[in-house]
Amino acid sequence: MKLLTFSLLLSLTSGFISPRTSYLARPPVTKSGLFAKAGVYFGTVTGTTEDIATMIQDELTNQGISCADPVCVDNIQGHLAPVFAKHDTIIAGAPSYLKMRGEENIEQTGTAWDNVLNYDILCNHQCNLDDEEVRQVLQQKNVACFGVGDQICYPENFCDAVGELHSVFSQIGCKMYVKMPIDKETFSFTKSKAVKEGDHDSVGLLIDQDGQYDLTPLRIKMWVSKLVDDGFFA
């Protein structure tokens, strides 16, 4: 189990934006020029997570939710706290894969999210925002997580990054949405950090674009609809 603390979230990048700056001075807008209520942030290696992020944006638009263009976390300049403050709601997504360190399997996303999820990478991080200021920006903000994985190749680690991102934001004090029932007739994975032990629901949207791409549009539609119904954008 990785050590996750809310202070790690600010270490995604090395830049610094003063917490005293007005974060809402230039809120992101949609193509129509309207304030973007939702911000979609993703990490990607092959481009699959970006594709899903774009599909989520399209579905949000279809359901009348203003959403800025998805942002790759690797391209963010400065800390995430002031960036996230620009939106009422945050949707965060990442891929999952295993990597070898010696004889040990370690789970990473292969993206800048790893700077948040892996404590050993951050032991010497520099940060000019203290914990209280982080809480003031992110606490009680609505957050939902999504991710992509491969059930056939990684049945015991499917979409683990979804569960890890959920834990990070939850420990900060964000309001986490939404649990989704796991359909055993369509999902075949055996284990995932996105599904808590003894639970039958996932803590976010799980996508298998390798083996079940045909189910992706419906899964996204159902997830976004549940976000709307549960008051995520209220």
Image (cartoon, rainbow, N blue to C red):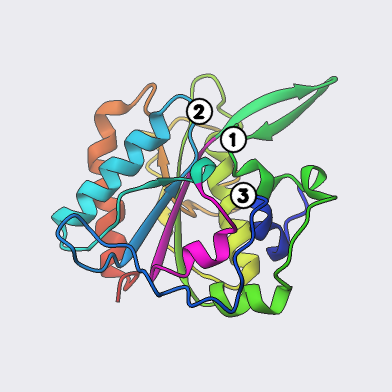
Q: Quadrant of residue 67?
A: bottom left
Element marked by disc 1: loop
Q: Which residues are magenta?
A: 76-95
Residue picked out by circle 2: 45
Quadrant for the C terminus in the image:
bottom left
Residue occupying image coordinates x 28% and y 64%: 36
**CB under 8 Å between callouts 2 and 1?**
yes
Q: Is residue 46 above or below residue 118?
A: above
The amino acid pointed to by label 3 is Glu
The amino acid pointed to by label 1 is Thr
Element marked by disc 3: helix
- Could you tell whether 88 is left or right of 66 in the image? right
Q: Is residue 114 above or below residue 37?
A: above
Q: Is residue 32 above or below residue 193?
A: below
Comparing 107 with 66, the one in front is 66
Q: CA distance from mark 3 to mark 2?
A: 18 Å
Residue picked out by circle 1: 109
Q: Is residue 97 above or below residue 139?
A: above
**CB under 8 Å between callouts 1 and 3?**
no
